[in-house]
Image: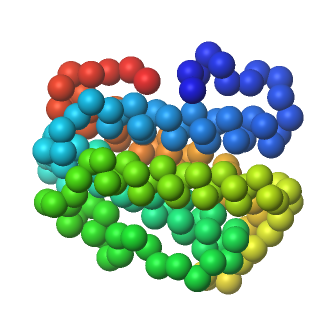
Amino acid sequence: MDYQTLPRAADERTTLIAFLDWQRSVIERKCAGLSDEQLRERSAPPSNLSLVGLLRHLTDDERGWFRRTIAGETIDDLYPDDADFEDIDAAAGDDTLAAWRVECDRSREIVAARPLEFTARQRTGREVSLRWVLNHMIEEYSRHNGHADLLRERIDGAVGY
């Protein structure tokens, strides 16, 4: 997806989904063409962030918000206890991207089956709507895509969307 093709006058649902999909495409592009070693590189010390760590974190965000919260599935994180950022020495880029894509596809199915007004309860017991979750995920990807911009530039000088 390209930023220029985002809808400029669509309904709310179409706009939210398009922006989330665009944010998803940005992190994927930030990871494209890099070796496993580059994806694991913590290129902005003293931060422990890496591109593979960000992708693993976003994978669990997809699982947590859409599958666990909205769909009510009883599932664990794939990368518990901050393993998404810390335990990356053996992380393979292709496997990480494949797991992330599976979660994104499942999230899309969950969103397609529910209205924006659909509500569910977080693990904390707080009620959230699908609308809120979509907005939150756009924010989550936006924040981490900013991190990814800096990491990627430090790895190989690549900049831009």
* In the rendered image, the vertical position of residue 47 relative to residue 35, given as above or below: below
Is residue 44 among the parts visible in the rendering? no
Is residue 26 among the parts visible in the rendering? yes
Q: Nearer the viewer, residue 53 or 104?
A: 104
Residue 72 percent coordinates (x, y): 68, 77
Which quadrant is the N terminus positioned in? top right
Residue 108 percent coordinates (x, y): 66, 51
* In the rendered image, the vertical position of residue 59 relative to residue 155, given as above or below: below
Toward the top, the furthest residue is: 4
| Left or right, 106 with reference to 8 | left
Q: Nearer the viewer, residue 45 or 72?
A: 72
Residue at x 56% of width, y 21% of height: 2
Which quadrant is the C terminus positioned in? top left
| Left or right, 32 with reference to 35 | right
Q: Within the image, what quadrant is residue 38 found in?
A: top left
Residue 61 percent coordinates (x, y): 50, 61
Residue at x 22% of width, y 65% of height: 86
Residue 57 percent coordinates (x, y): 39, 59
Residue at x 32% of width, y 76% of height: 81
The image shows a total of numbered marks equal to 0
